[in-house]
Amino acid sequence: MAAIVGYGAYVPKYRIKAEEIARMWGKEPSSITSGLNVFEKSVPSIDEDTATISVEAARRAVKSSKIDAKEIGAIYVGSESHPYAVKPTATIVAEAIEATPDMTAADYEFACKAGTAGMQNCIALVETGMIKYGMAIGADVAQAAPGDALEYAAAAGGAAFIIGKEGIARINATVSFTTDTPDFWRREGQPYPGHGERFTGEPAYFRHVMGAAKMLMEKMGTSPSDYDYAVFHQPNGKFPLRVAKKLGFEKKQVEDGLLCPIIGNTYSGSTMLGLAAVLDVAKPGQRILAVSYGSGAGSDAFDITVEDAIEGYPRQGIRKMLEEKVYVDYATYMKFRREFK
Amino acid sequence: MMGVARYWREIPVRYNLIGKKCGVCGKVYFPPRNICPTCRRKSIGKMEDYKLSGKGIVETYTIIHTPPPEFDGKAPYAVAIIKMEEGCHLTAQIVDCPLDEIHVGMKVEACLRRIQEDGKRGAIYYGYKFKKAED
Amino acid sequence: MREVAVIGIGMTEFGELWNRSFRDLVAEAGMHAILDAGIEGDEIDAMYIGGMSSGRFIGQEHVGSLAVEVAGLEDLHIPSIRVEAACASGGVAMHQGYLAVASGMYDIVVVGGAEKMTDVVGAEATNILASAADREWESFFGATFPGLYAMMARYHMKKYGTTPEQLASVAVKNHYNGSLNPKAQFKRRISIEDVLRSPMVAEPLHLLDCSPITDGAAATILAPLDIAKKYTDKIVKIRASALATDTLSLHGRKSFDSVPAAYHAAQRAYKMADLQPKDIDLAEVHDCFTIAEIMAIEDLGFFERGEGGKATEEGRTAIDGEIPINTSGGLKSKGHPVGATGVAQINEIVMQLRGEAGERQVKDARIGLTHNVGGSGGTAVVHILEVI
């Protein structure tokens, strides 16, 4: 199958602590942090949005892959916070990396898994020979109503993956598990999403993530112990650890890709940033299971083997990037989110 | 309210810092110029697109406290004249840097950010801003 | 070329003139100038009206025709031309009027300048003024007009050690002078502390480092020198009218701590008048911001580069100083109705040279200079006048 040629990640440098948000709404901070396993989340600056985050990630991916962006034949940007309701983010990215005009592009929306859906599309286009390289981006500046439980985790960030025939990691297989399950949504014209509260757990996240993971392992004839790393979508810091345990993965397989506790849920960026963080440290021959989750609902699972080429790849060091941070208070957070109308 | 064409035609320049290089004397101009002020008529038809590296240093700067309407709610923000590696100067915002840490001589590099938007219903305009250079 | 004289001046009060329209202002300034010159309307051969942006301030273009109608001169069907060069519109209108008379084309020419700025809200006025800068490559990115001068101030301070107190001393002096000018917008005297305590507009410039938003109009009547004698005994001759340009954008210039166009306009004017900076008795300079006056007195050669701040602080540019600068109060205190400013500067110099400046009169003033700048320095106009 196709391979990951390169990747780039970007998370805005601003953070707000869960305790600062809790202070605002009179909540006990420790009940939030221990309940969600999210201690702080990334905050986009006032001039950042899904397009600028996508561009930053895409530029980093192109630069480290050392490919000519003109050879990218498809760009898909998955997000639930595209700056326009109608008008693609992907064209902004395409222009900003100078990949235009001999290419195709589109925006995807499937809650938090729209980025991995883009990866699957790129794999298919590469496999069929329609394109040489495809770029899939998952990025969000996640919305949350002030005071809603989502506010502690809804974060900003994104990752771009370039897919081609040969690369730094082989994609052995990908499967999806999809049903119609309305656990989380945002209606047309509404600024904030709504959700089914505890319904978002068992029938939604756990059923789909586990369904996709099991399907993939069955198809590949593998078991959790065959993987060096596992990345699961991270709506909070707890779910991915619990789903790992349920599937029979150990904590150490999940840790390297678990970013939610320190940056929050980057929605479409979540699984892809986790996978990027794993590729930052993975060695040739190691195997990765990555499973996204998008409300509504579906999961895309990927079985990946790291190739020798990763040794020469200039890895970005996502965790190091995340150390460069500036804390903001709630008022600044609201200003940056352009919440003052 | 301006038509979008005015912004659209500058997209390559504002996203990717595509300036002009005089095919006669080799001097690089950004923002792009139609005619090289040194070579003048000799440069006609010889001004070639030239992509800047995106790296420069702050020559002088200000912190804007009273913004025009398009930048309502954004102040205070920093605006600088930046001398690019290629020798030309441009005006741009400095972002992601505490305002009191910005200084003359600071090394900066370009990034893509939202510059302004045409009200709530109009188009969003992106372009270059600068942040502290990583190296 | 014929020699040209100013035979009449007139201007409105400057300020927030809520109850007066653009037409009212044009009419009043023009009428005063005509009465001052003692001419009849049908002697007028042409009019040049400086205005920066009536189109955006009041949604009215076609100011040449408007001025003819306001003056009641439509039956003469004379040429009436609107001139635009941002904040230098008035100065450029003077230059055009001067050329028209000097060339022999016209004899009696009215040069006016007017701006009605308070019919838009403050933020919109800021935006309109920003159109004097490069909209595509400066304003688009969030640079404001004060911001551009602030960047020049920062550069000047870094290079020469100019201090915030020295910048403030320009405002203090000009407010003092303005307190002696009945037509000034601000007649309130201020202190260095007042300036430094006022809110930041664009660092390092405080609110009191900036000229205000002003309504106002000014006019002059020009005539060939030989005809001028027919109308007045106190003839003020235009010894030089020089204009220079530079890039529209500040970042495109060779210098950020001076206004090269002003330097070149001054050099041309001195050459044309066969005079040197030391021959000038007083000057009205374009102090749209305090740093602008410091750069102006350096560009004009009154002081060495980098010495302007210190000189101002030491009082050398006060009314009783060695080279009085902005006796009218300047743009800072008298007010800055952009299109009118260049013409109002001529008004002040003519008053001083005629000995009609009252409390702010400079003793034995014989030769005066005006310095009018458009934008951040894309256009500059220098006039030298002498009473004969």
Image (spheres, coloured by chain):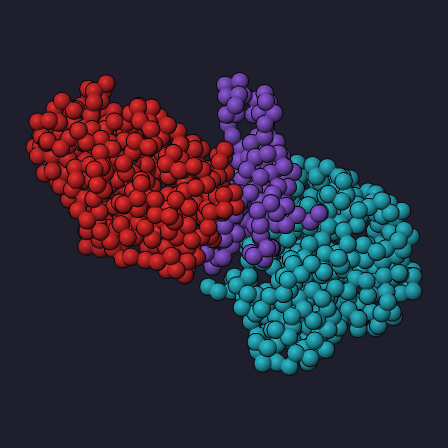
Residue A239 x %, y %: 75, 71
Residue lying at 10% horizontally and 26% vertically, measured from the top left: C229
Q: Is residue C187 left or right of residue C124?
A: left
> Could you say which is closer to the camera, residue C116 or residue C183?
C183
Residue lying at 50% horizontally and 25% vertically, measured from the top left: B37
Q: Is residue C340 left or right of residue B29?
A: left
Whether residue C365 appears in this view of the structure is yes
Residue C41 x %, y %: 9, 33
Q: Count up the numbered dots.
A: 0
- Residue A62 found in image quarter: top right
Residue lying at 64% horizontally and 81% vertically, measured from the top left: A28
Residue C355 x %, y %: 16, 40
Q: Is residue A152 left or right of residue C116?
A: right
Chain ID, purple in image: B
Please name the color used to draw chain A. Answer: cyan
As drawn, C274 above or below C127: above
Q: Is residue B127 left or right of residue B1?
A: right
As drawn, C136 above or below A320: above
Whether residue C50 appears in this view of the structure is no
> Could you say which is closer to the camera, residue A251 or residue C350?
C350
Please name the color used to draw chain C. Answer: red
Residue C33 x %, y %: 14, 38
- Residue A263 found in image quarter: bottom right
Residue lying at 7% horizontally and 32% vertically, measured from the top left: C40
As drawn, A244 above or below A315: below
> Could you say which is closer to the camera, residue A336 or residue A7?
A336
